[in-house]
Each structure stands twice: as C-alpha cells, then as structure tokens.
C-alpha cells in the first residue's frame, strides 16, 4: 500500500507526540512492506532538511512565512507571528499553501498514493493567516483525532477563538474517514463536531525493541515526569504534591524532562523540596528510555490527554506508572494492577501514591511486570501498523465504491 501522511512536526526538530507517533508508525509500515511518504508545511526556523529518507520513509518539508534563518525562532520570526492575518496571508501564506497542495497532488500521482492521513492538529494553520480549507484529492483523506484546538479548549472549559474553531470544523467536514487515538477522544469529538458515525479507534502504540538492554535495577526514590511544562499536563499539581513527599522522604529525587518555563514551578516548592527537583529540559528518546528504566516510578497527572505517548514509553521499559484518571487515562491503566490512577486536582492523593510506590517494593515489581505485559499484549507498533492497514483498506474501498 502507498500511504501519505501530512505532518508538520516530523522528527528531528521541535516535534511533539504527533511527530513521534507518525515517525514510529511510518517506519514500521515500511518494515512491513508498504511505501510511506510524509509531507508537511513548516516555518523556516524549524530547520532540518527539505527532503530526506528516514529508514525508508520519504520526508518532504515545505516552508511558509519569511525566511529569517533556520537555527532558532529569533526576533524576526516572533515579529512576523504577531502580524495581522491579512499581512501573513499575503506574505507567502496563501502562496505557500497553494504550492503545498500542488506538491501533495504531484505525490499522489507519482507515487500512486492509496490513502492520505492527517492529524487534527496542524500548527501551521494557526500562523498562515487564513482559514485553511482542504481540497478534494484522488485518494481518501483520513483525519485522525489526536487532539484538535477545539478539543483542548473544550477540555479546559474555555471559549475557543472563532477563526481557529472554524479551521477544525472545516477539516472534520472535509474528512473522507475518521479515526481517533482513544475511545474518550472519539466520544468528545463526536459531540463537538457532530459527525454521525463513531470514528475508528486506533490507540497510539510504541516500539518495544530497543538498542540497549533494559536495566531492571531500580534506583531508590527516583521519580520522573516527562512532558511539556504547561498546566494541562498537571505539572503544577505534581510540584505541589512533591512538598508533601519530601516531608516523608527527604532524599527522594524528582527529575522533570520537558520544555517550558520553570520559574513559576520553583515558586511552588519549599526550600527542601526545591533542592530535590531537577529540571532536565529536553532529552533524546533513547536517553529518556534509559532513565525511565531505572526509575522508581513515572508520574503523569494530566488534566487532558488524547492517548499520551509518555506513559506508554515508561511502561515499555518496565517503569511503574502513576497516571491521570482523567480523559483516556483509564484506557491504559487499571488502578492497582498495572499502575496507579490519580486525580490531578487531588494533591494529597498524588503525594500518597508516590509515597506508596517508594515504600512498597512488591508493588513496584508488580506494576513493572504487568505494565510491560500490557504494552506487549495491546500496544506494540507492529500490531498497530497492521490495524492501520486493515482500516485503510476499508476506507479505500468505500472511497472508490
């Protein structure tokens, strides 16, 4: 099968979970004998090559905006981003998008593309200066729900800006088929976008063959958080709970991996707790896997997730997980069996669950064993790739019928 993914955060670069998932899935589909092409519309400061082949995956990066350099988001890029929509639309916005669509059509013809998949979050649509409307293609367009702008604003009880909500609405109305990364996300999106039939649920999955040996020896009292340092991820709740953990275990250590501002987080920590928190910034996936494999536990107290990769990564290397009970958290963790569930608003509960794992080696071992078995049974990338192909076949049949 010939598959085209539309993705504007394909690694390396400033990618998030969407980019990682597209890369992991694309590589596996190539291993299973399929042809995969990825194309995205990127700002110049994203950097990376305009064209490359990544383990058999052909990757095209087209650009929008003005070229002020590719090394980082400098003053000029920021100034451009603050310009009114009509200026950005005319300063390469409309022209860049038209070139992008022409390239997609060219790839469909040249590579005989059978199916196209696009995520419902596309960063460039917020900055290009006009409400994007996707045209019809000669192959079906699958929209995968990984968390749209409208979705996350609904989750946090905020009123979305009309122009961005319109972009989401246009995309869902345009879709030839729909999938979602969790049952929870599918149910929320069906309510928000009022499509008649449920979307196909295809959970995010993960690779389980690592190029290093998983270390089964856990470091005592080593806790890890990984994710963007924003309120939605529950990081503020976690640092508040950490003050209570340190009252009981003064030598416990919390390692925080992820990009974001740290000053407001540090203000929530008392003097003793602050000394036991280490802000590590961004790190490679390989290093993160190694760190997780030796940790006492990883904590993910999110308020809103579709189906996060971070808990999957921890479980895959046998790291005990404390996961949110909100959103799709219960689709991965069964409380007391393969991990613990917490309410991100309940600071005492977060602290209690961390302390429980620090003090209970038997529970650590149970979560480690059962968590990895959960991944191997239900969430491997090999299984996910086969499930995607089965779904794509049905979509292609319906599209041409």
Image (cartoon, rainbow, N blue to C red):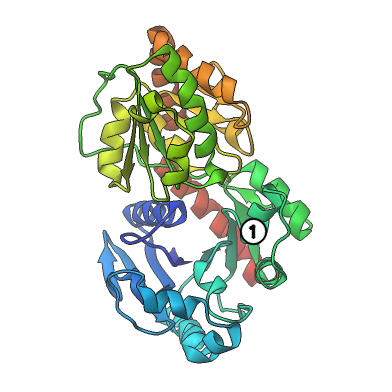
Residue at 56% over, 78% down: 138
| Camera sees residue 41 | yes
Q: Describe residue 211's horizontal placement relative to residue 23 as left or right.
A: left
Q: Extreme front residue here?
A: 271
Q: Position of residue 350 (x, y in %)?
A: 54, 23
Residue 278: x, y in percent? 32, 35
Q: Is residue 367 left or right of residue 47?
A: right
At x 58% / y 34%, what residue is drawn? Answer: 329
Q: As rendered, which of 317 and 237 lies closer to the eye? A: 237
- Image quadrant occupied by the C terminus: bottom right
Residue drawn at point x = 59 percent, y = 54 percent: 147
Viewer-closest of 373 and 212: 212
The answer to which image quadrant residue 349 occupies is top right
| Residue bearing the label numbered 1 | 178
Where does the image place residue 390, in percent across and percent down from the top left? 53, 52
Residue lying at 62% horizontally and 60% vertically, measured from the top left: 149
Element on which disc 1 rests: strand
């Amino acid at each position: 099968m010939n598959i085209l993914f539309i993705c504007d955060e394909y690694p390396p670069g400033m990618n998030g979970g969407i980019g990682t998932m597209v890369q992991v899935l694309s590589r596996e589909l190539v291993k299973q004998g399929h042809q995969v092409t990825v194309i995205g519309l990127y700002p110049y400061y994203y950097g990376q090559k305009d064209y490359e082949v990544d383990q058999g995956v052909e990757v095209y990066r087209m650009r929008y905006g003005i070229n002020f350099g590719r090394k980082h988001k400098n003053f000029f890029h920021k100034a451009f981003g603050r310009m009114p929509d009509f200026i950005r639309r005319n300063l390469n916005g409309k022209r860049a998008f038209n070139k992008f669509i022409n390239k997609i059509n060219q790839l469909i013809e040249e590579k005989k593309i059978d199916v196209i998949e696009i995520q419902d979050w596309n960063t460039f649509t917020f900055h290009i200066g006009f409400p994007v409307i996707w045209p019809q293609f000669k192959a079906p367009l699958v929209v995968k729900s990984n968390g749209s702008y409208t979705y996350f604003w609904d989750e946090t009880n905020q009123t979305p800006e009309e122009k961005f909500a319109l972009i989401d609405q246009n995309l869902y109305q345009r879709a030839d088929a729909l999938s979602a990364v969790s049952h929870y996300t599918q149910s929320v999106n069906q309510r928000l976008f009022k499509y008649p039939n449920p979307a196909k649920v295809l959970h995010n999955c993960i690779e389980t063959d690592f190029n290093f040996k998983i270390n089964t020896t856990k470091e005592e009292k080593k806790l890890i958080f990984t994710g963007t340092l924003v309120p939605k991820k529950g990081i503020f709740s976690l640092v508040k709970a950490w003050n209570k953990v340190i009252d009981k275990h003064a030598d416990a250590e919390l390692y925080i991996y992820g990009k974001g501002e740290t000053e407001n987080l540090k203000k929530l920590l008392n003097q003793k707790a602050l000394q036991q928190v280490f802000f590590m910034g961004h790190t490679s996936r390989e290093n993160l896997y190694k760190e997780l494999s030796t940790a006492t536990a990883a904590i993910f107290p999110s308020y809103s997730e579709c189906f996060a990769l971070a808990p999957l990564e921890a479980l895959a290397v046998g790291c005990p997980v404390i996961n949110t009970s909100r959103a799709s958290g219960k689709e991965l963790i069964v409380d007391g069996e393969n991990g613990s569930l917490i309410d991100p608003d309940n600071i005492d509960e977060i602290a209690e669950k961390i302390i429980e794992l620090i003090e209970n080696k038997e529970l650590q071992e149970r979560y480690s064993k059962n968590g990895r078995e959960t991944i191997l049974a239900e969430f491997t990338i090999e299984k996910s790739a086969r499930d995607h192909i089965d779904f794509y076949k049905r979509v292609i049949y319906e599209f041409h019928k």
